[in-house]
Image (spheres, helix red, strand yellow):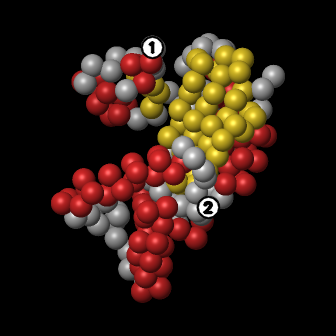
């Protein structure tokens, strides 16, 4: 989708993910880790890290590496899971190190050499269901192998539309809480 706005490249730590992309004609995806991106300094105007930095032992080091590959005044878009009290099986399965509050995320971003331009929580529609389900599972000691099996496929379309509708709120204001946090920041020198 980003290639519609200029050249786009991708990085993934998983050889299977890189192969998956290449099989679909996305040949600019490279194998690599966010802590050592395979690009020259100042290579990009815009970097996205969507559900990435929560996996890092040192999130600030990863953010500094993103800063390194950004051009002067380049922007980063971050999307991360929010609130440790929402920790669930999928966080364990996905090897998350943390979930963020917005202040924690902004502190990390600024510590890495960025100026925050906009931030908000997101995914408010699913906050209460996620909180209730994960709390019940915790209280009852229930343990699933993954949360991906908790799905009613007929609801995917309506849920996707509900989640996408948040963009109308986010264009005008910020959301006070949600399952995720989002931030746009600019590289500062």
Taking the image as shown, residue 2 lies to the left or right of residue 35, namely: left
CA–CA distance in space, label 1 to label 2: 35 Å
Residue labelled with disc 2 = 176
Quadrant in which the C terminus appears: top right
Q: Which residue is drawn at 60% across and 19% down?
A: 45
Q: Can residue 34 be seen in this view?
A: yes
Along the line of sight, the residue nearer the viewer: 7 or 87: 7
Residue appearing at x 53%, y 32% in the figure: 48
CB-based contact (under 8 Å), mark 1 and mark 2? no
- Tell me which residue sits at (60%, 50%) in the image: 173
Q: Quadrant of residue 67?
A: top right
Helix, strand or loop at label 2? It is loop
> In the figure, is residue 109 to the left or right of 172?
right
Q: Where is residue 41 in the image (x, y as percent from the top left)?
A: 66, 15
The residue at which mark 1 appears reads as 7
Of callouts 1 and 2, the N-terminal one: 1
| Residue 112 in the image: above or below residue 165 | above
On screen, 49 above or below 93?
A: above
Query: Closer to the camera: disc 1 or disc 2?
Result: 2
């Amino acid at each position: 989708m980003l290639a519609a706005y200029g050249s786009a490249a991708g990085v993934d730590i998983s050889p299977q993910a890189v192969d998956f992309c290449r099989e679909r004609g996305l040949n600019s995806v490279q194998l690599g880790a966010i802590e050592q991106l395979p690009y020259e300094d100042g290579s990009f105007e815009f970097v996205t890290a969507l559900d990435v930095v929560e996996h890092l032992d040192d999130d600030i080091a990863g953010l500094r590496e993103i800063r390194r590959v950004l051009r002067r005044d380049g922007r980063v878009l971050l999307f991360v899971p929010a609130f440790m009290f929402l920790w669930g099986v999928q966080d364990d399965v996905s090897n998350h190190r943390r979930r963020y509050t917005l202040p924690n995320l902004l502190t990390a971003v600024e510590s890495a050499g960025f100026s925050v331009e906009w931030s908000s929580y997101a995914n408010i529609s699913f906050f209460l269901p996620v909180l209730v389900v994960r709390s019940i599972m915790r209280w009852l000691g229930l343990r699933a192998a993954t949360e991906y099996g908790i799905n009613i496929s007929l609801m995917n379309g309506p849920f996707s539309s509900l989640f996408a509708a948040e963009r109308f709120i986010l264009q005008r204001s910020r959301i006070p809480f949600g399952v995720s946090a989002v931030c746009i920041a600019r590289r500062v020198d």
